[in-house]
Image (spheres, helix red, strand yellow):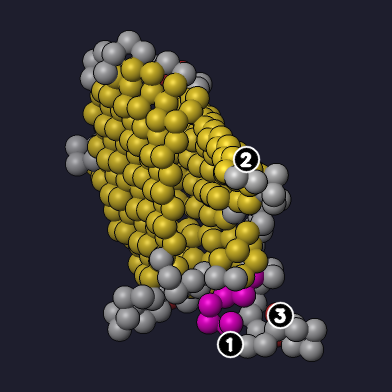
Amino acid sequence: MKKRILTCFILFSLCTELASAQDSSATAASEPVDTKHLWHFSMTPSVGFTFQSISKDAEESEDLMWLGQLQAKLGYEGERFQLNNSLFLQYGARVSRESSPKKTQDNFMLSLVPSMTLSKKLGLRLFFEVTGETEMGEGLIDSQKTKFLDPLFLYETLFLGHKTRIASEDGGDEFEFVFGIGYAFQETRTSGFVLTENRSFVVNEGNPLENVQDQFTVEDGYSAILQLDYTKRIGENFAFKTSMKTVALTKENFIKAAKNSRVGTLLVAGLQYKFLSIDYTLHMLYDKNISLRRQLEQTMVFGLKFTI
């Protein structure tokens, strides 16, 4: 573990020296930079509802399904240093007279990604990403109870990557593409949630969970990241937006068994006309710590959306 941490530190140091050498070769005099245009912020909340009422013979039922979603981004694009932070929240539930509210979707993802330019011509950057993923409400995964921060998945990855950003002069079209490979440290925090490998143990008062697993499970391995964002304004009040991010993280003995990895994908695509929208969301996750089965959620929602 110490050798791997040292390797990451050496990689970071070399990249820093490379970036410093490029800066020293430039002229000392430079024009003042308007920092107002280097920062960018966007927040898009949306909500959709589906109501169903059925009356047949002596049976009557009424169901209300709702789904709320929030995407927020805060970034800084400097010539040498950059910062890109993102937040994705999604929560939905089914409400009926016959039963208590039942959760249908629940996702919380927060990413902090500072980066440093190594070669502006090649679009080469050194990224450091810290991401946390959890659920906000109580639920079940493979009959195991879940709640906020239980389980919580964290990863910190230092990766070398390329970033391309293209925007039309009128601002109607924007395209951003990021990919890279690096090294990551992964932590899975648990409180009452039992990891897959420990479910064969009997957990009770005589043999509590702390005797079976630690609250933090730490792993390390290689990482690969692919991300794209695309926006096209079709008309004055009509726009199409899509974003996709896939992260693959290897774990111990990955070469012997590909299942020793974590793969997560989040895809959001939607059409918006003024305040009306139709959005498609796909969230796919495979992590053998959580479940041996692939977790897949897909939603299509007509609703209201605002962009700040």
Which residue range is magenta in the image? 193-199
Q: Judging from the image, what secondary structure is the residue with disc 1 in?
A: loop
Q: Find residue 34 and report its image quarter.
A: top left
In the rendered view, does 160 fall on the left or right side of 60?
A: left
Q: Residue furthest front?
A: 57
Residue 210's tag is 3
Between circles 2 and 3, the one closer to the viewer is 2
Say what amino acid the circle numbered 2 marks: Glu
Between circles 1 and 2, the one closer to the viewer is 2
Residue 217 at x, y percent in the picture: 57, 73
Q: Residue furthest left?
A: 121
Residue depicted at 61% across the width and 51% down the height: 103
Q: Judging from the image, what secondary structure is the residue with disc 3 in?
A: helix
Residue for badge 2:
62
Query: Which of the pair 221/153 is nearer the observer?
Result: 153
Whether the magenta-drawn stretch holds residue 196 is answered as: yes
Residue depicted at 29% across the width and 32% down the height: 230
Asked if 214 appears above or below 225 in the picture, the reply is below
In the rendered view, does 152 fall on the left or right side of 121?
A: right
Residue 302 at x, y percent in the picture: 44, 31
Residue depicted at 31% across the width and 27% down the height: 240
Whether the magenta-drawn stretch holds residue 292 is answered as: no
Task: Say whether marks 2 and 3 touch (CB < 8 Å).
Answer: no
Say what amino acid the circle numbered 3 marks: Glu
In the rendered view, does 147 fall on the left or right side of 168?
A: right
Residue for badge 1:
200
